[in-house]
Image (cartoon, rainbow, N blue to C red):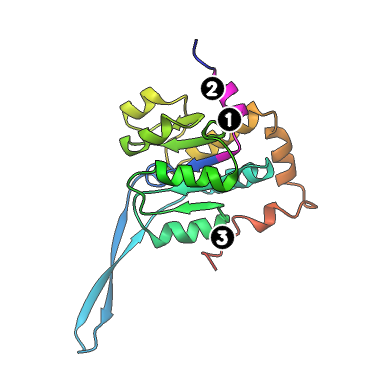
Amino acid sequence: MAVAPEYRARRIKVILFDVDGVLTDGKIWVLPIPFVQPDGSIGSKAVEAKGFSAHDGAGITLARLGGMKVGVITKRISEAVAIRARDLKLDFVYQGQAYKMKAVREIAQKAGVTLHEIAYVGDDVIDLPVMRQVGFAVAVANARAQVKAEAHYVTANEGGHGAGRDAIEFILAAQGLLAKCIADSIDESNPVPPSMDIGKGGD
């Protein structure tokens, strides 16, 4: 008998996200930046840019208010991801991970949780090994068909357009915490929300 997604979501204490195609729309902008070389000639270097959803940032604040830890695991290495992770004060940031289960096992140990208490949000086949082992596997709306087929829940929105928020709100709702977390996030006497996602570009 299949286990209902809501039941799986009730046990979650850690939420982990892939980045490209999940917290972004999957586009990777490589921008050439000109500079003057020591000999006076003009050279260029590439800078990678990504676009992140403010809705997801607010969702991560809600997750934190719900007592959850949040992190990202991505194959690519990008300063844009490092900056966004610092802005959001993410608990776990793993870049350069071709095989993501190693990072997941390390995170589980650090957080003191089991794999059944971890949710993972992915979009491509590189995410399948993790999705097959965690307690709650989420595919974004723009995920590959193979990934959607093995997910416990598919978000309404696409990556980079609020998919992360969908996953977080589903988990909080299953735990009966969503309304309280929203109320706490707009309570001016609560010191937690202003300290997150403050948009200072990683300063």
Q: In this view, does 88 lie above or below 16?
A: below
Which portion, as a residue range, is magenta? 4-14
Residue to which mark 1 is pinned: 170
Q: In this view, does 130 lie above or below 53?
A: above
* Sequence-first disc among 1 and 2: 2
Name the secondary structure under disc 2: helix
Q: Quadrant of residue 12?
A: top right
State the image coordinates of residue 117 (x, y, percent, origin top left). 57, 33
Pointers 1 and 2 in contact (CB under 8 A)? yes
Query: Is residue 10 highlighted in magenta?
Result: yes
From the viewer's side, name the closer residue of 8 and 66. 8
The answer for how far apart the CA atoms under marks 3 and 1 are is 25 Å
Which residue is at 49% across, 57% downward?
A: 84
Total marks placed: 3
Query: Which label number is shown at residue 199?
Result: 3
Left or right of 194 on screen, residue 74: left
Residue to which mark 2 is pinned: 5
The answer for how far apart the CA atoms under marks 1 and 2 are is 9 Å
State the image coordinates of residue 154 (x, y, percent, origin top left). 45, 27
State the image coordinates of residue 66 (x, y, percent, origin top left). 68, 40
Q: Which amino acid does label 1 sit on?
A: Phe
* Sequence-first disc among 3 and 1: 1
The answer for how far apart the CA atoms under marks 3 and 2 are is 33 Å
Pointers 3 and 1 in contact (CB under 8 A)? no
Which residue is at 41% across, 29% downward?
A: 132
Q: Which amino acid does label 3 sit on?
A: Gly
Q: Is residue 198 above or below residue 73?
A: below
